[in-house]
Image (cartoon, rainbow, N blue to C red):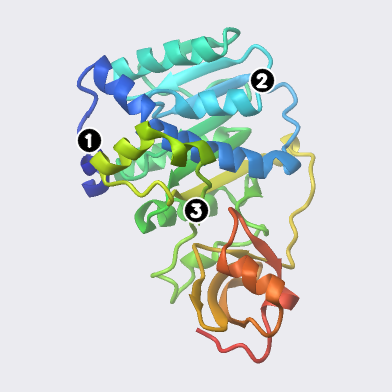
Amino acid sequence: MRQGFLDTDGHLPDYWHDERWLSAYDQTLAQRIRWKWLAVLETLAPRWPRLHGVTSIVDWGCGTGIATRSFLGSVGLPKPKVFLFDRSSGAMRFAAGAIQKECREADVVLLKTMQIPAEPFVLLVSHVLSELDDRSFEELKKLAAAAALVLWVEPGRSLESRRLSRVREALLESHHILGPCRHQKSCGALQPGRENDWCHFFAPVPREVHQSAFWREFSKRMKVDLRSLPVAWLAVVKPQNYTGVEPHQDEALILSRPRVFKGYCRWLGCTSAGLRSGDFQKKHDKTIFEALSEPEFMTALPQNQLIRNDDAPV
């Protein structure tokens, strides 16, 4: 099933054979997705919008419901109404049970067809872009345009990330960008000449995972590097639902992982002026060099310290 995800080009068949597969997925691959969601939600916490009167969630392509469960566990909504939509009815039933087990107050509704709710809603989307044809992609963008808040998490591969950047472009006029960007301008990765770049980061893996015999066996059998958890994500909110701190437009958000050489780092960053890249010399500032050498999730550094006249452009 995992290989199918890796090989798909937008035509992945229904892969849920039975509840046993759903349970196995939920205990393994879905947990890796949960770690991504938790990293994103923690990053957004200081700038979390005030969602007045928003109590509904639409989980599109819900799978086992890991996005909703992560959201409700981290943020919560008072007596939430959760609409689940997935091409697999078995997955929706499994997700409904898992959500209600973790949040007893949730009122869960299974949708046979996707309708836009009349009330303001939060849209959660997780790991779907590799499976969508163009028609489904356009329908999902319309749903996102109607949402009060959109939280979208994808694998950190080029295909999904660049598609997600196009979603961001479509929502720029109607929504305020919460993250990952530090600005409200067009995506630098979509500019001419940047076709080989994409916006992605590496989410942290819980420490206990590296001490777990279960996860060691999982890593061995599935050939998964537990140290690497690449993620692309997007969070946008309608202005009327947003009260928060404005982004720091003088920061450069470090993408991926800089390449470390003897005495310098080669970095790529997102700025309000587009993508910038360069070589940062260790002799200039040891603290910044160390931050680039081992970046945390969503590392952002002041442009005036990072971009120097004597740095060689890449």
The structure residue drawn at horizontal position 22% and vertical position 43%, both measured from the top left corner, is 3
For mark 3, what is the residue?
202
Closer to us: 162 or 135: 162
Three-letter code, disc 2? Leu
For the N terminus, which image quadrant?
A: top left
Residue 292 visible to an observer of this rendering: yes
Q: CA separation, marks 3 and 1?
A: 23 Å
Element type at mark 1: loop
Q: x, y (%) of residue 128?
A: 37, 39
- Taking the image as shown, residue 223 lies to the left or right of residue 102, namely left
- Mark 3 and mark 1 lie on one chain; the one further toward the N terminus is 1
Q: Amino acid at mark 3?
A: Phe
Q: CA distance from mark 2 to mark 3?
A: 28 Å
Decide which of tag 2 and tag 1 comes sooner along the chain: 1
Tell me which amino acid carries mark 1.
Met
Query: Which is more N-terminal, label 3 or label 2?
Result: 2
In the image, what residue occupies the spot 74% across and 43% down?
47
Indicate left or right for 229 with 286 as reference: left
> Circle 2 — which element?
loop
Pointers 2 and 3 in contact (CB under 8 A)? no
The residue where tag 2 is placed is: 77
| Crowd rating for badge 1 (residues with CA inside 10 Å; few <14, some 14–19, many 20+) | few
Residue 224, horizontal then vertical, whole percent: 32, 46
**Residue behind mark 1:** 1
Horizontal side, residue 179 vs residue 87: left or right: right
Which SS class for mark 3?
strand
Rendered view: 114 above or below 126: above
